[in-house]
Image (spheres, coloured by chain):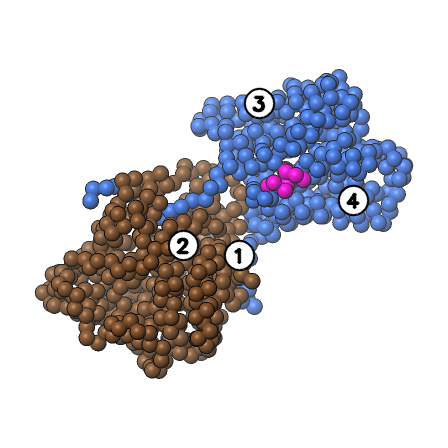
Amino acid sequence: MSKLLTVSPSPHNYGKDTIKSLMYGVLIALIPTTVVSLYFFGLGALIVILTSVFSALIFEYLITKYILKKEPSLLDGSAIITGLLLAFNVPSNLPIIIIIIGALVAIGVAKMSFGGLGNNPFNPALVGRVFLLISFPVQMTSWPVPVQSRMQYLDAVTGATPLGLMKEGLRNGEPVSDLMTQIPNNMQMFIGNMGGSLGEVAGIAILLGLVWMLYKKVITWHIPVSMIGTIIILTGIFWLINPDKYADPVFHVLTGGVLLGAVFMATDYVTSPMTTKGMLIFGTGIGLLTVVIRLFGAYPEGVSFAILIMNAFVPLINIYVKPKRFGEVIKNG
Amino acid sequence: MLKTFSRGGVHPPENKLSAVQTIEQLALPKMVTIPISQHIGAPSTPIVKKNDLVKVGQIIAKSSGFVSANIHSSVSGKVIKIDSVMDSSGYKKQSIIIQVDGDEWEESINRDPQLIKEINLSSEEIIKKVGDAGIVGLGGATFPSQVKLSVPKGMTAEILIINGVECEPYLTADHRLMLEKGDELMVGTKILMKALNVSKAVIGIENNKRDAIEHLTSLSSNYEGITIQALKVQYPQGGEKQLIKAVINREVPSGGLPIAVGAVVHNVGTAYAVYEAIQKNKPLFERIVTVTGKSVKNPANYLARVGTSLTELIEASGGLPEDTGKVISGGPMMGKALNTIDIPMTKGTSGVLIIPVGESRRGVVQDCIRCAKCVSVCPMGLEPYLLMTVSEQQNYERTESERAMDCIECGSCSYTCPSNRPLLDYIRLGKAEVGAIIRSRKA
């Protein structure tokens, strides 16, 4: 008997999930949204996506290697996701240099300064987006018109987003019913034929991604359902009270970043709670804050802020919200 | 409708390679090494000495306390020494080494295979005899069975649950037993029911063993009070608490025993051993062992004598494969990795699993990405990522308050972690420390 055997504590077999497989699960789910954004915003979308993804990868590589002095793991997919999501959260006529700045903030500040994947408290892509929104408000709120601007980039014809139109109109005292005639119908909005950030427009593509991620068990239903559900209920209440002053729930769900946020941003593993109960609280909180900002705040859109604010609550939620322990019911009851 | 437990759980590949191999009697070894501590509790006290002649089934070490068990010789021959020998735990244990000579059984053992259905002993007599026969839980925990049958004062058993789940991948010993010794198992169950004074017993079997479910269901019409419950395949359903939850939908309170919810759980192997002890007067000195693995030439289920070297079991299945990386005593989820195959099988050895080199190393540990998968798979409703962190920080107060002691060490968290984090390793460390703290508090 001279054979050397490996000894380790149990378990001795391991599941197939790896960081890479989970991240690629998300990337596959992002394909439909990418395709739709290319269809509606063409050249601009292509330039924005490529710039964002490549700069995210380059910053991740440089920072990991030369500042953190670790072996860069570019292919785990997380930097690609951050790059892609940042691109999805900006208009398709954003100048290249601004995108690069956004990627630097997202990867360098929001992710790597905390120690890299797994350690960042805030969603990197959203930090990048909000940084740009505050620093470059003009460029970040000029929205190319879909289809029409396909072959254009910086010179794209721009228009307002449905949410922007609504906010502006309501401020001028116009009733919702009049404003509704100026925006695309629900079907057009569902397939993505409206102004907006390049990844947020197509509800149907995002929902396809959601179905895939649920099927592959990359994420669970708790965050998207609680977030969207809260938005539907709250905006529904206001709409029922005064349909002239408040738009209907379907409008609120299909416009802006609600679906993109609920499916791809709020579900980010690193910055969301660890228990299902916690996830429900987190999703509900985002829904609530989004509605408050949209209906009563200065900005027409509030998903990014709502998610970032709730990100800050995640450590607290993790401390106070515990899973239901086995055997607890009987002991206490 | 298939039942299952409600919280957590994983689905490792089943790999039941030896499921169709009938139970084979393993050839008698030339020598056996019988450790005096094969059970949970106090080691037994040897009552033979060097050069004594023993028969098959003769008692050679006596139970040394309430939680302890008798040990019987599995062979006939001469005691050549009593010495410290390493067993599957990796520690040296006192063992009785016997040189085999012939196969002469104690005359009191009835070797006629004829089924005896009638149960003549009273409840107390059954419990005593189960203790005398040295029967321990054969699912792997090796808890002395007579202790589990002695219901504490003030508590009553309402239901007996027989564990035929065998949720560990690869292992098939219980599966074969249910198929080949169905009637004996049923009578054994009736005996346990009588001992516990309950009128209801449920045999829980996972749905990946359809043939066993059908076979036992057809037999059950002859045995009043016994029903068969098919269960949805989900690891760790064979865990006592999970099985009770699955079958009668009750949760054993944290820190409590199954009897707190009126249930007593015994493994199918134990029920069979009880049948043999009560009806045939045969103490526990042999058991069914699965020898398996993807690279093993002939995966098989052996009826083997306690004390047989694992080397002989592996030889019988075609020898240790060239690409062996790990040898596991038990299944891949909770079994023990051995550093040599030159150790004896014991009452608790349910299987010998051989894992090729390619599958025996762990992946590189990466940072936690907080995917929450460990929390969602934990069958006890714990937060493994957090327990690992607080245990790693040696914050044992928090380790305790986060209920590390509830952990059943099923390994679902480590199994599922995409970052290959050694979750269970650290939780075990934390449990050991917390356990010591709790004991010193009581003292």
Looking at the picture, which amino acid does disc 2 mark? Answer: Glu
For mark 4, what is the residue? A249
Q: List the single residue furthest toward the left.
A: B51
Q: CA distance from mark 4 to mark 1?
A: 35 Å
Q: What residue is drawn where x is 35% and y is 38%?
A: B358
For mark 3, what is the residue? A54
N-term mark: 3 or 4: 3
Looking at the picture, which amino acid does disc 3 mark? Answer: Phe
Q: Residues within 10 Å of mark 2 (few under 14, many from 20)?
A: many
Looking at the picture, which amino acid does disc 4 mark? Answer: Pro
The chain containing the residue under callout 1 comes to B
Q: What residue is drawn where x is 21% and y is 76%?
A: B108
Label disc, if present, on residue B168 of the rendered structure? 2
Tags 2 and 3 both on a single chain: no
A261 in the magenta segment:
no
Q: State the predominant SS element of the stretch in magenta.
A: helix
